[in-house]
Image (cartoon, rainbow, N blue to C red):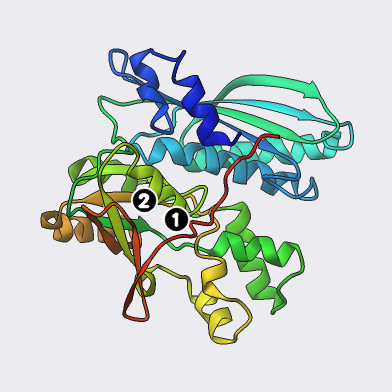
């Protein structure tokens, strides 16, 4: 059984409308204007080890609030649960974690309101995020002929993970850049507030660009076309690619990007550009929504049917 199968089973017992039929990354209580999400992060899966506790908690917090941001909502309150060994949560590590939480609170204007602590052999965090909004942008509300956009760059986190696994070598400056992007994704904070003005659908990229795009089309007779050459890459990503130190196609679809993936009508192109300038936020149009039952990628000027979506899927044994 994988994550998709489990969600299908849970739909049979979760019938409250605020659950949005488990077809989104948040719950939304429209009456009380309450938006919420929950995520769990385990050592060995979501982060390699506990070597950098002050960076791990930053990654966890930013990964968690990205769901809320992609709905056009500010994160307001966080609950964080910690599980780990005495070594994980030594006095030194706790001080580093608390200091990082303070920094993230200031940067993203949320309040830590509580949580829980438990003893465990491996480190684990669970984060609940809450915010208030008069409405939200659903994940699966894309329309035929919508443009597809992504904020920021993609692929940097995947390269950073490979640097930490010593699979890539380069200068200290470049290595540090990618590891920073792995631990501290550049969230499109601020720009997210403009989404209501043009977006039909929106979600964050967590499991991978292609697999998350596929999720946007759940229960819809729609497809997508993405232009590989338009996928936004950082300067250093392109540099490593030019030097043949990385293969872009091995990193662009692996996830952990935490950028906003949204769709909008063509008539909003100028407005989207206007707000990208206002917030100094890179926003790239990478494709469009089609009425095809299949999904395609334009690669070297050829239209190729997508068969391998890559990305990350939780499997339960």
Q: Are marks 2 and 1 in contact (CB under 8 Å)?
A: yes
Q: In the rendered view, does 175 fall on the left or right side of 231?
A: right
Q: Nearer the viewer, residue 132 or 101?
A: 132
Quadrant in the picture for residue 239: bottom right
Quadrant (top left, top right, bottom left, bottom right) of the N terminus: top right
Quadrant (top left, top right, bottom left, bottom right) of the C terminus: top right
Q: Nearer the viewer, residue 229 or 195?
A: 229
Indicate which disc, 2 or 1, sits on the residue closer to the N terminus.
1
Quadrant in the picture for residue 277: bottom left
Rendering coords of residue 304 (x, y %)? 36, 70
68 relative to 181, above or below: above
> Which residue is under mark 1?
209
Q: Residue at image x 73%, y 62%?
A: 164
Rendering coords of residue 40 (x, y %)? 62, 32
* Res 181 label: none
> Which residue is under mark 2?
261
């Amino acid at each position: 059984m994988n994550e998709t199968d489990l969600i299908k089973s849970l739909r049979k017992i979760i019938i409250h409308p605020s659950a949005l039929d488990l077809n989104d990354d948040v719950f939304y209580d429209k009456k009380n204007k309450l938006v919420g999400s929950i995520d769990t992060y385990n050592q060995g899966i979501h982060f390699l080890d506990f070597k950098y506790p002050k960076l791990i908690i930053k990654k966890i917090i930013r990964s968690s609030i990205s769901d809320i941001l992609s709905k056009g909502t500010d994160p307001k309150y966080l609950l964080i649960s910690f599980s780990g060994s005495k070594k994980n949560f030594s006095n030194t590590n706790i001080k580093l974690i608390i200091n990082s939480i303070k920094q993230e609170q200031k940067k993203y204007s949320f309040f830590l309101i509580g949580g829980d602590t438990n003893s465990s052999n491996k480190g684990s965090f669970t984060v609940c995020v809450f915010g208030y909004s008069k409405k939200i942008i659903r994940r699966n509300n894309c329309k035929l002929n919508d443009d597809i956009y992504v904020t920021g760059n993609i692929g940097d986190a995947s390269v950073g993970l490979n640097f930490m696994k010593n699979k890539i070598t380069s200068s200290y400056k470049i290595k540090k850049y990618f590891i920073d992007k792995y631990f501290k994704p550049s969230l499109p904070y601020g720009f997210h507030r403009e989404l209501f003005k043009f977006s039909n659908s929106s979600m964050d990229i967590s499991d991978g660009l292609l697999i998350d795009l596929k999720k946007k089309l759940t229960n819809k007779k729609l497809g997508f076309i993405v232009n590989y050459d338009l996928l936004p890459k950082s300067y250093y990503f392109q540099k490593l690619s030019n030097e043949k130190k990385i293969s872009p196609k091995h990193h662009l679809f692996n996830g952990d990007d935490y950028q906003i993936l949204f769709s909008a009508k063509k008539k909003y192109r100028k407005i989207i550009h206007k707000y990208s300038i206002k917030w100094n936020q890179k926003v790239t149009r990478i494709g469009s929504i089609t009425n095809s039952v299949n999904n395609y990628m334009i690669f070297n000027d050829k239209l190729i049917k997508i068969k391998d979506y890559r990305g990350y899927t939780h499997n339960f044994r």
